[in-house]
Structure formats: structure tokens, C-alpha cells
Amino acid sequence: MPTTLWDFSLETYRRPGVEEACWKLQDELGADVNMLFYCCWRGEFVAGEMGALLAELAPWQDGVVRGLRTVRRTLKPMLAELRDLSEPVAGLRRKVAALELEAEKLQQDMLTRHAEEYAKDAPPSPHAAVQNLKQYLRCLTNAPDRNAVNGLETLIEAAFSNAPRGDVKAALAVLNQIMET
């Protein structure tokens, strides 16, 4: 596994199906993609960590990252409407997208700092990732449906592509219990 959260995220995001899965989890569940990657990258959370982490990140995630994403998404349909200004608006949208990516990277720096404060000896594993993701999903307003669980399966398989297949399958079986509870 890559040593930095950013490298891990980029490597995992490039794998087949992960980009689409992340978009769906973001749009349908309100999931923070950085948190999804962090749940996989980090060893199992300690008691109380999830609440502390989400409280720490909320102002940045809500005010900066989502704010920039909203501006970028708002500009997209305007490209056609502003015919003679579409080129400058497209340029502005690219700049906002670059700022959004920079804000995402800064959020990952915050997550890395958090990991250093809460770190324990448990290494990342498919099982730890599922436990972390289950905690995170409980904090979201929308409950996961079958499509969301499929997206999480895609993420876990991509994040742990080098892990023993049996470990990944066992973790995915636990993940599927989300649908039963």
C-alpha cells in the first residue's frame, strides 16, 4: 500500500470502476470521498475517533470543498447558456476544479495529521476498512442501498487488490451484512 493517503487515493481512484463508485457514493449518500479513502487507508479506528474526526473536518468539508464543488457544478450548465462567454466560463470552471482538487488534497493532509494523533498499531486491512466504513455510513443521512454497497465493494477490492483474496472476500461478506441490518 502506498505510504501517503494522497498516493493511496490516487492509485485506488485510477482502478476500474472506482471513480464511478465514488461519484455515486458522494451523490447518493452524501459521502465524502476523502473519508471513504481514509477509512480504507487507515487501520481500524479507535473508540470515539469517527465523531472527533467528522467534527474536526466539517467546517472545511462543508464550507470549502462542497462550496467549490457547488460553484464548479453550477458553471457546467451555464456553458451552453452563455454562448459568447462559454470559453471564459469554461476557463473559470477549470480554475475552480483545480481549487477544488487542491482543497481535497489539503483535507487529506488534515486526515493524515489526524491519523498521526490517533494512530495505533493496527495496519490497514480489508476487515479494518469495512469496520471503519460501517462507522462512517452510520453518520450519513442517507442509508446505503444495494448500489451503494456495490460501490463500497468496488472500493474495497481496488484498495486491497494485493491483499489475500480470502481476506477481501471475508471483509466483503461483513460489508454485505449492512443490507441485512
Image (cartoon, grey):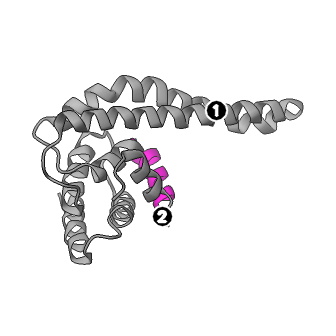
The local secondary structure at tag 2 comes to loop
Quarter containing the N terminus: bottom left
Tell me the magenta residue range: 15-32
Horizontal and vertical percent for residue 93? 69, 34
Residue 28 magenta: yes
Count the labels in the image. Answer: 2
| Labelled disc at residue 15 | 2
Position of the C terminus by quadrant = bottom left
User: Upstream in the sequence, badge 2 or badge 1?
Assistant: 2
Q: Which mark is residue 55?
A: none
Name the residue located 61 percent from the left edge and 36 percent from the top edge: 97
Q: Is residue 46 left or right of residue 114?
A: left
The numbered disc on residue 74 is: 1
Q: Position of residue 110 (x, y in %)?
A: 34, 31
Residue 9, image x, y percentages = 42, 51
Res 127 seen here: yes
Query: For numbered disc 1, what is the local secondary structure?
Result: helix
Where, by quadrant of the figure, is residue 80 drawn?
Answer: top right
Amino acid type indicated by mark 1 = Thr
Residue, far front: 3
The three-letter code of the residue at mark 2 reads Arg
Quadrant hosting residue 75: top right
Residue 15 vs 109, above or below: the answer is: below
3D distance between C-alphas at marks 2 and 1? 28 Å
Residue 79 forms part of the magenta stretch: no
Q: Residue at x 21, y 69 (%)?
A: 173
User: What is the magenta segment's predominant secondary structure?
Assistant: helix
Residue at 76%, 36% (x, y): give it.
Answer: 90
**Viewer-proximal residue, 124 or 166?**
124
Residue that lies at the very extreme toward the right in this rendered image: 84
One can see residue 31 in this view: no
